[in-house]
Image (spheres, rainbow, N blue to C red):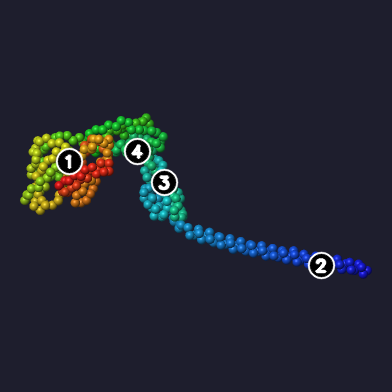
Amino acid sequence: MGLKSKTNQRGFTKTQNMFQLFNRYVVTNSKIIIRNIIIILFVFVVVFGLVTSLVFWVVRKGPPEVTVPGITGGELIEGLLILQKKNLRAVVDPRYFSDYSKNIIVEQDPKAGSIVREGKDIRLTVSKGSIVSIVEDYTGKTMNYVQNRLQEIFSFQGKTIKLGNVTYVTSEYPQGSIVGQFPPPNTPITNVDTIDLVISKGKEIQAFNLNDYTGEYINDVMKLLALRGVLVHIITEEVMNPALSGLIISQDPPEGELVKRNDTVTFYVGYLPSEKEKEKLYARALNFDVPPELETAVIRVVVADRIGEREIYNAENKGGDSISIPFKSYSNTTIYIYVDGGVFEVRKME
């Protein structure tokens, strides 16, 4: 009986020791693990909150929001200016439309009223005009214009139309302008492969017999002679009758004399004493022969008088061309002639 009791007591003691061991290592360590997990979760929540706050702050600090304006149906230039004021960028998509004129905004994306941030791309569908199905009227245009126009409209339609024969004629139209074409305007382009052009080379300046210009106003006569390349020299004479001021009193050479380009005609013109000393605006003519050794050259002419400098001519010419340029200026005029960008000649006119 005593032996059994001792055995039971030892078993109980051993069980108690195991329980204490379990409590010491397992329970205590579990508490530490749970505590560490809680700490980690707490740190994660704090870090997540900070990151979220930072992202939210960065987003709020981005470009300000603006309302997309409605520019559909307006001119492209006006629409671009409106978008620029809103700090929005335009992406232009040009297309042909039969119902819209050229450079009209047909569609926009995003739509008007949308809220976007500054710097956003606004895609604009812009009309290039109607699809051309007939030959256009090129009267008054230049050959460069026609070349660019044919390339623009027909390359889109998958058809090639080129320039054919080019003929130059003397006419009243400005030099370089188109005065005729074949096929004529409104011809269907179905079977058209080439377009022939007739281009003006300006007025042909020939010798002519001088009229009697006595009694006519000097400016009217100067305009007329300038078109023929005739130079005019004016000598003022004092008159007392106001009706004679500005009128031609006499001329040299006289009526019937043969004159031609670059010839000079002298006119004696009446002016009142009060008008005689004033600077007057005259119609003049500049004649210039393009150096024949040049194949082509860009000729630019600038005149300078008391009201400042101004360009009166700027065009490409062939070597050997004779140019006559009518213009108006005051007395003591300086003329600068540029050939291919460089000063070629300086002339003085009183």
In percent of width and height, residue 24 lies at: 75, 66
Asked whether residue 232 appears in the rendered view, the answer is yes
Contact? badges 4 and 3 (CB < 8 Å): no
Image quarter for residue 9? bottom right
Location of residue 170 with respect to 11 vertically, above or below: above
- Residue drawn 40% across the image and 45% down it: 126
Q: Residues within 10 Å of mark 2 (few under 14, many from 20)?
A: few
Q: Amino acid at mark 3?
A: Val
Name the spot of residue 282 as percent of width and height, x first: 16, 46
Question: How far apart, in angstroms, are the residues tagged by discs 3 and 2?
Answer: 88 Å
Please give the residue where the numbered disc 4 appears in the rendered image.
148
For this rendering, which residue is in front, 42 or 194?
42
Instruction: Please indicate, yes or no, whether residue 177 appears anywhere in the rendered image.
Output: no
The residue that disc 3 covers is 92
Residue at the image point whose x is 40% and y is 52% from the top: 83
Q: Answer few, some or many: residues within 10 Å of disc 3's Cα (few below 14, many 20 plus, some between 14 and 19).
A: some
Query: In this figure, which residue is indicated by the disc labeled 1?
Result: 226
Nearest to viewer (mark 4 / mark 3):
4
- Residue denoted by label 2: 16
Measure how far apart labels 1 and 3 are at the Cα level: 48 Å
Residue at 53%, 59% (x, y): give it. Answer: 55
